Image (spheres, rainbow, N blue to C red):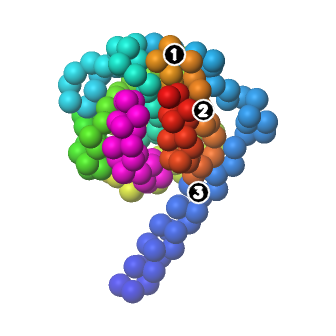
Amino acid sequence: MMLQKLNKAVAVFFTAAFFLVIFSYPPAKAEELYAAPEKAIDFILPAADGTSVRLHDLLEKGPVVLSFYRGGWCPVCNEQLQSFQEILPNIQDAGAALVAVSPEMPEHAADTALGNELDFYVLSDKNNTVARGYGLIWEVPEDAREGFSNWLKETTGRSLADYNAAEGYELPVPATFVIAPDGAIVYSFIDPDYRKRADNADILDALGRLH
């Protein structure tokens, strides 16, 4: 029994290590592959609460902080979403709205919002349509898909297709934009290394410069 537990622990360790290695290294010249557009691209997406949200409508009221994340199954994404919740009062004080977007289906986006106790927009971007428009598509390498799928299934009991209702291994590159009311993107953070995320202080500084 002890040997079985040890073997299982070793297997879990190496699966996690495999996942970390595969997803930690950005492609060469990543800064050239992922560049923010100068102007925000409008969209209408379903929210976790069942309503629809249009970016243009939010911009008519003030700036928008728009962040793309991979899914509620991603621990780093959840940490970032929780940190966004902490600065939500500051964002609102700046007259801005906060929007998080992932390819998760609305019911899973709702689970993410509920599990992280989020009070901002959590939207579902089926097939990464909006992320594609922003040039944020990244695909799990073919030789890493089995390891990734095994990790996700063992960790959550679901596959990527279960979460996204779509076949394939496309994920949005984690990115955060601060968008001025006229649609100009005044701050952007894009990094294919999923462990690296926008600094909240930089987001608030960018909002402050709009006043």
Find the distance from the CA under tag 3 to the CA under tag 1: 36 Å
- The amino acid beneath tag 3 is Leu
On whether residue 96 falls in the magenta region, the answer is yes
The magenta stretch is: 74-101
Name which residue lies at 51% across and 73% down.
10
Could you say which quadrant of the image residue 109 lies in? top left
Outermost residue, front side: 211
The percent coordinates of residue 129 (x first, y second) are 47, 19
Residue shown at the point (22%, 21%) measured from the top left: 51
Does label 1 or label 2 sit earlier along the sequence?
1
Tell me the SS state at disc 2.
strand
Q: Nearer the viewer, mark 3 or mark 1?
A: 1
Q: Which residue is mark 2?
A: 188
Disc 1 designates what residue?
183
Q: Name the main secondary structure of what is drawn in magenta.
A: helix
Q: Secondary structure at mark 1?
A: loop
Type of amino acid under label 2: Ser
Mark 3 vs mark 2, CA separation in Å: 25 Å
Q: Is residue 147 shown left or right of residue 156?
A: right
The residue to which callout 3 is attached is: 20
Q: Amino acid at mark 1?
A: Gly
Mark toward the start of the polypeptide (3 vs 2): 3
Callouts 3 and 2 close, C-beta under 8 Å:
no
Res 168 visible: no
Q: Residue 128 placed where, x, y %?
A: 47, 24
In-front residue for pair 33/2: 33
